[in-house]
Image (cartoon, rainbow, N blue to C red):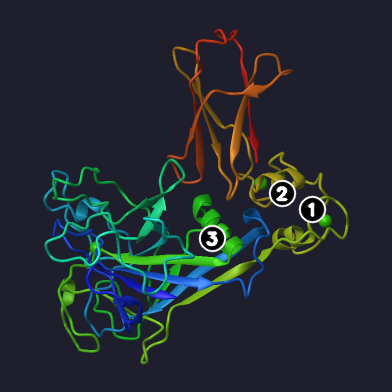
């Protein structure tokens, strides 16, 4: 499926182009025109294997630009303050043009990847008129993972001049920024230019999103750009320069190829021919053979192959293994522990005073930095203050 997600008009799933542009009109989402794409994968990839069993080597989206010389190619991320002309920290854009960004898809108002289809209503307020305030109401939206590990709507990360909008601006981290070889940075982009988005597989939350999507058989992605919304007729030679925006060919487009998703990886099945506890598919994915044994430690990080398999870390990367690698204390002897997060894994932190009996540490987990988990202990006064030494361990689930 593909659907131009834009406040005005219904049945926008039948459009032949899906533009990406911003609106700085305070009545609408700043990322005004988004492009939702979806693939039903269950005919190609087995479903319900369990999210962590979908191992990915590459995830790439390809889309074609359907408007000639209308916008300037910018292959690099622009910080949000370069858009925030009405805010104190505004800085000028360092390079010509605006990047095109790829995100995951979030849904609200009861919709999901399954139930939001090409002709579903845009949002809770429907139809939108120019008199309605529609900020943050769209049913499908570009999203990234926030520090609680939940999808966060990025449609208004630059902030809003509307007093009804109280969320402060925040920086985004796109899952990919589009690149093309059909134009040089700073040049106008010709029609039929192929834009490639290589999804960031170093971020365990993004990998986890893809894994869950394959597990369910429905994968959804959203393209967005804060390119300015100066109109250029599709198919025309706009020459709009920095004032215009990309328009992507949808699957309804008769002139240019539709979006294409390329995933490389393996679904780990249960077979374990050499009976060493490491599934064949996992061994072949990482080592190209079944030669490794459970107790081996190829990358010499002191985590065995079996431990790396069980915790979802990379057995070929010495920096990838589960361990507590940062500890600080506050005045009440509460610990703050840092450790790496792996895709589709959750964690339990346990504590002990004697290394004999363990119980759940009291506190909360957050994910403030890519690939990292942070446990902030908040010990209640009862049970009593611990002795001088306390021990902690992280359990991967
Ligand atoms: Ca720029
Ligand atoms: Ca094996
Ligand atoms: Ca290892
Ligand atoms: Ca490792």
Question: Is disc 2's CB within 8 Å of ligand 2?
Answer: no
Q: Does residue 304 appear left or right of residue 374 in this picture?
A: right
**Residue 100 seen anywhere in this rendered image of the structure:** no
Q: Earlier in the sequence, mark 1 or mark 3?
A: 3
Q: Residue at x 20, y 65 (%)?
A: 128
- Badge number at residue 278: 1
Circles 2 and 3: CB atoms closer than 8 Å: no
Tag 3 residue = 210
Q: Does residue 293 appear left or right of residue 226 in this picture?
A: right
Circles 1 and 2: CB atoms closer than 8 Å: yes
- Badge number at residue 309: 2
Q: Position of residue 42 (x, y in %)?
A: 61, 71
Compare residues 298 and 339 and report the one nearer the observer. 339
Q: Is residue 173 above or below residue 295?
A: below
Q: Quadrant of the C terminus?
A: top right
Question: Is disc 1's CB within 8 Å of ligand 2?
Answer: yes
Q: Does residue 22 appear left or right of residue 389 in this picture?
A: left
Compare residues 54 and 191 and report the one nearer the observer. 54
Q: CA distance from mark 2 to mark 3?
A: 19 Å
- Outermost residue toward the bottom in this view: 255
Q: CA distance from mark 1 to mark 3?
A: 23 Å
Question: Is disc 3's CB within 8 Å of ligand 4?
Answer: no
Q: Earlier in the sequence, mark 2 or mark 3?
A: 3
Q: Residue at x 31, y 48 (%)?
A: 171
Q: CA distance from mark 1 to mark 2?
A: 7 Å
């Amino acid at each position: 499926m593909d659907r131009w997600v834009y406040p005005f008009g219904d049945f926008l799933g039948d459009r032949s182009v899906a533009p990406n542009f911003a609106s700085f009109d305070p009545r609408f989402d700043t990322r005004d025109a988004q492009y939702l794409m979806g693939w039903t994968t269950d005919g190609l990839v087995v479903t319900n294997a369990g999210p962590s069993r979908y191992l990915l080597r590459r995830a790439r989206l390809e889309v074609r630009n359907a408007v000639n010389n209308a916008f300037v190619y910018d292959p690099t991320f622009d910080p949000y303050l370069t858009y925030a002309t009405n805010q104190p920290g505004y800085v000028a854009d360092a390079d010509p043009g605006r990047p095109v960004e790829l995100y995951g898809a979030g849904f609200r108002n009861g919709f999901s990847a399954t139930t939001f289809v090409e002709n579903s209503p845009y949002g809770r307020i429907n139809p939108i008129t120019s008199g309605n305030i529609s900020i943050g109401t769209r049913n499908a939206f570009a999203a990234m993972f926030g520090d609680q590990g939940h999808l966060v709507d990025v449609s208004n990360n630059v902030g809003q001049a509307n007093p009804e909008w109280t969320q402060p601006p925040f920086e985004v981290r796109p899952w990919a920024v589009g690149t093309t070889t059909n134009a040089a940075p700073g040049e106008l982009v010709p029609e039929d230019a192929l834009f490639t988005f290589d999804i960031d597989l170093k971020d365990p939350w993004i990998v986890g999103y893809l894994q869950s999507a394959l597990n369910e058989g429905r994968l959804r992605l959203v393209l967005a750009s804060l390119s300015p919304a100066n109109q250029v007729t599709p198919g025309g030679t706009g020459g709009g320069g920095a004032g215009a925006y990309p328009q992507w060919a949808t699957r309804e487009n008769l002139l240019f190829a539709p979006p294409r998703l390329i995933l490389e990886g393996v679904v780990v099945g249960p077979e374990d021919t050499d009976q060493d506890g490491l599934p064949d598919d996992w061994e072949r994915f990482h080592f190209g053979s079944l030669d490794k044994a459970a107790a081996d430690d190829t990358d010499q990080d002191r985590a065995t192959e079996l431990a790396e398999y069980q915790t979802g870390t990379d057995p070929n990367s010495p920096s990838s293994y589960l361990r507590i690698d940062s500890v600080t204390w506050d005045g009440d002897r509460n610990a703050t522990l840092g450790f790496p997060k792996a895709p589709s894994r959750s964690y339990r932190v346990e504590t002990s005073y004697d290394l004999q009996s363990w119980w759940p540490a009291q506190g909360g987990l957050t994910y403030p930095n890519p690939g990292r988990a942070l446990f902030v202990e908040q010990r209640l006064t009862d049970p009593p203050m611990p002795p001088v030494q306390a021990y902690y361990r992280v359990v991967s689930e």
